């Protein structure tokens, strides 16, 4: 059983915090497409920042990891529940860069 799209969207929006605009669309292949945009960067009109990832749980994690990095790099002091998972996100990034296939098990937040 998978959670409904709306439920996932609410969960993701909660984790991403007040600066994030979270949308989940259904892609052509019926996979969830996670879109996380930054309200502050859009409003300032410089460069809109957003992360798009398709896929199920892996897509969710990849989009949220990128958002977590964006917050830590651009919006120091911002509050968001996902920041609690920064060490896990950095570990996943490291594993992707070093080409390790299995990065899901130990640091999964759910
Ligand atoms: Zn931003």
Image (spheres, rainbow, N blue to C red):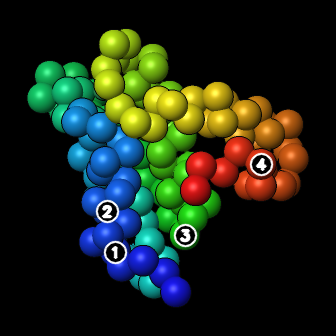
The local crowd at label 1, few if under 14, some if 14 to 19, many if 20 or more residues have their Cα within 10 Å, is some
Q: Give SS at disc 1.
A: helix
Q: CA distance from mark 3 to mark 1?
A: 11 Å
Estimate the x, y position of residue 45 in percent, counting from the top left: 15, 26
Which residue corresponds to the image point at 24% horizontal and 33% vertical from the top-left?
A: 19
Q: Relative to residue 50, is residue 65 drawn left or right?
A: right
Q: CA distance from mark 2 to mark 3?
A: 12 Å
Q: Which residue is mark 4?
A: 106
Q: Nearer the viewer, mark 4 or mark 3?
A: 4
**Residue 24 appears in the rendering:** no
**Residue 90 appears in the rendering:** yes
Q: CA distance from mark 1 to mark 2?
A: 6 Å
Q: Nearer the viewer, mark 2 or mark 3?
A: 2
Q: In the rendered structure, are the residues bearing label 1 and label 4 in contact, judged by CB atoms less than 8 Å apart?
A: no
Q: CA distance from mark 1 to mark 4?
A: 25 Å
Q: Which residue is mark 2?
A: 9
Q: Which residue is mark 1?
A: 5
Query: Which one is earlier in the sequence, the residue at label 2 or at label 4?
Result: 2
Query: Which one is earlier in the sequence, the residue at label 4 or at label 3?
Result: 3
Which residue corresponds to the image point at 35% horizontal and 32% vertical from the top-left?
A: 80
């Amino acid at each position: 059983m998978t959670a409904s799209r709306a439920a996932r969207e609410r969960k993701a929006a909660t984790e991403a915090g007040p600066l994030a605009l979270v949308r989940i669309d259904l892609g052509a292949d019926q996979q969830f497409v996670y879109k996380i945009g930054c309200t502050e960067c859009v409003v300032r009109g410089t460069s809109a920042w957003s992360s798009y990832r398709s896929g199920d749980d892996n897509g969710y994690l990849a989009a949220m990891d990128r958002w977590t990095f964006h917050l830590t790099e651009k919006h120091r002091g911002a509050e968001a529940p996902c920041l609690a998972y920064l060490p896990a996100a950095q570990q996943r990034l490291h594993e992707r860069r070093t080409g390790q296939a299995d990065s899901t098990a130990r640091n999964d937040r759910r």
